[in-house]
Amino acid sequence: MQTRMKEFRARHSITQADLAGRVGVRRETIVHLEKGTYTPSLRLAWQIARELETTVDELFSFDDEDAERNEETN
């Protein structure tokens, strides 16, 4: 998974802790999302996109390798 969360947070001067509080997760979750080591639920992705005034499609992208890895772990 690729994400532009850090870029969009910077545009809005929102810290990881602020964003986490707004969407109801721990700051560590935001850290993992930004590193691409955690794939958000659709609901969480939508909440984050709403807080950052963008769309899920603008914020997150998945490639075929990401999809294959997710299928292997499920």
Image: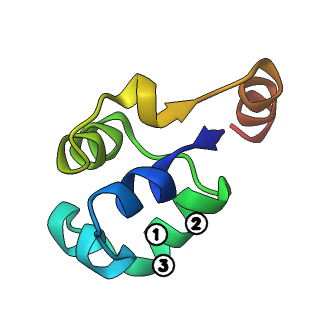
Would residue 65 appear left or right of 5 to someone viewing this image? Answer: right
Secondary structure category for the residue under label 3: helix
Would residue 13 appear left or right of 58 to someone viewing this image? Answer: left
> What quarter of the picture does the N terminus occupy?
top right
Report how far apart the C-alphas of labels 2 and 3 lie in the structure.
6 Å
Q: Residues within 10 Å of mark 3 (few under 14, many from 20)?
A: few
Q: Residue furthest top?
A: 64
Task: Tell me which residue sits at (32%, 81%) in the image.
Answer: 17
Task: Tell me which residue sits at (78%, 18%) in the image.
Answer: 64
Where does residue 66 sit, x and y in percent of width and height?
75, 31
Q: Residues within 10 Å of mark 1 (few under 14, many from 20)?
A: some
Q: Which mark is residue 29?
A: 1
Q: Amino acid at mark 1?
A: Thr
Report how far apart the C-alphas of labels 3 and 1 lie in the structure.
4 Å
Where does residue 30 sit, x and y in percent of width and height?
45, 67
Residue ID for mark 3: 28
Task: Tell me which residue sits at (53%, 71%) in the image.
Answer: 31
Please say if the residues under marks 3 and 1 sit with CB atoms less than 8 Å apart: yes
Q: Amino acid at mark 3?
A: Glu
Q: Amino acid at mark 2?
A: His
Secondary structure category for the residue under label 2: helix
Secondary structure category for the residue under label 1: helix
Where does residue 73 sit, x and y in percent of width and height?
76, 41
Report how far apart the C-alphas of labels 2 and 1 lie in the structure.
5 Å
11 versus 17 height, above or below = above
Which color scheme is applied?
Answer: rainbow
Residue ID for mark 2: 32
Please say if the residues under marks 2 and 1 sit with CB atoms less than 8 Å apart: yes
Q: Nearer the viewer, residue 73 or 15?
A: 15
Give the tally of numbered discs.
3
